[in-house]
Image: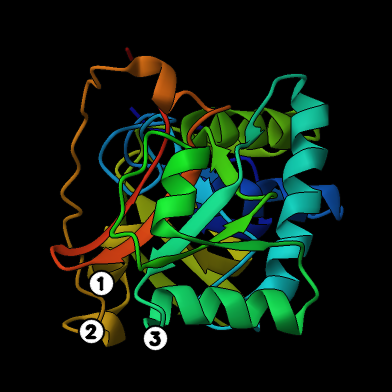
Amino acid sequence: MNVQYSGRYDAIIVGVGGMGSATAYYLQKRGKRVLGLERFGIPHAMGSSHGHTRIIRLAYYEDPSYVLLLRRAYELWREIQGKAGEKLLHITGSIDAGPEESWVFKGSWESCKLHDLPHEVLTGAELGRRYPGYHLPPEHLALIQPEGGFLTPERCIVSYVMAAQSLGAEIHGHERVLEWVPLEGGVRVRTDRGTYEADRLVMTSGAWNGDLIDVLDGLAVPERQVLAWLQPSRPDHFRPNTFPVFNLLVDEGRFYGFPVFGVP
């Protein structure tokens, strides 16, 4: 079926996942006329923003420059959490651990020192005594940052979409973008249900960006993240209040994970 054309938009957002839903809300909040297009449902399990939990951490081993962005992100998550009236951000503390000279531990430590973030450094043995769910090599070092935790990504998407809609944004689920073409002073987007025009186009379609933006073909390559759900023999050691989220570098590889939450 065809969607009734409702005029020209200030911005069309292609992909309404974690990035697209937030973009829709903040553009609409700034008084823009917004259309969000999502080829699947909202939320869905075909992208990178689904599941029960996603880590958020203030100590960032990748580069200390992220910390300024993260401080703002925490503010915005608390803002949308208050607007939604449900808990989206869960603070557990975060652990970045590995050998003393490893990039995971050292990078996180540098971020904390540069930005004066509260933190502790424990040995693997000390960490295990505090949090019995952890059994790291005793000589490894673990940085604990108390403001780390996780978000509930699917509820975050729903919260942003509903907030955007409450301000007047149009959000269409199950509508696939087929092509887009630049116009003088704007863009035209054709979907399997209609055609729309806007001043600006925002692409937040994740793994499908390469199909819609030819310059990304072969450069933006989706990768599968292999996940495991484990049922511990001592669940009390792996609750959000007893098991901080983690990034670990050990002989077997680099791993990240969460406490038990949302599933038994």
- Measure the alpha-carbon separation of dots 3 and 1: 37 Å
Is 209 on the left-hand or right-hand side of 172? left
> What is the secondary structure assignment of the residue under circle 1?
helix
Q: Residue 83 in the image: x percent, y percent?
A: 82, 28
Mark 3 is surrounded, within 10 Å at the Cα level, by few (under 14), some (14 to 19) or many (20 or more) other residues, namely few
Quarter of the picture holding the N terminus: top left
Q: Quadrant of residue 120?
A: bottom right
Q: Residue 131 in the image: x percent, y percent?
A: 48, 37
**Residue corresponding to mark 2:** 219
**Residue corresponding to mark 3:** 101
> What is the secondary structure assignment of the residue under circle 3?
loop
Mark 1: which amino acid?
Gly
Mark 1 is surrounded, within 10 Å at the Cα level, by few (under 14), some (14 to 19) or many (20 or more) other residues, namely some
Contact flag, marks 2 and 1 (Cβ < 8 Å): yes
Query: Residue at 21% across / 28% down in the picture?
Result: 230
Q: Residue 169 in the image: x percent, y percent?
A: 70, 39
Mark 3: which amino acid?
Glu
Q: Residue 151 in the image: x percent, y percent?
A: 56, 38
- The answer to whether residue 209 is above or below residue 239 is below
Contact flag, marks 3 and 2 (Cβ < 8 Å): no
**Residue 31 showing in the rendered view:** yes
**Residue corresponding to mark 1:** 210
Mark in front: 3 vs 1: 3
Q: Nearer the viewer, residue 142 or 95?
A: 142
Q: Nearer the viewer, residue 239 or 19?
A: 239
Mark in front: 3 vs 2: 3
- Measure the alpha-carbon separation of dots 2 and 1: 8 Å
Quarter of the picture holding the C terminus: top left
**Residue 62 showing in the rendered view:** no
Is 239 on the left-hand or right-hand side of 217? right
Mark 2 is surrounded, within 10 Å at the Cα level, by few (under 14), some (14 to 19) or many (20 or more) other residues, namely few
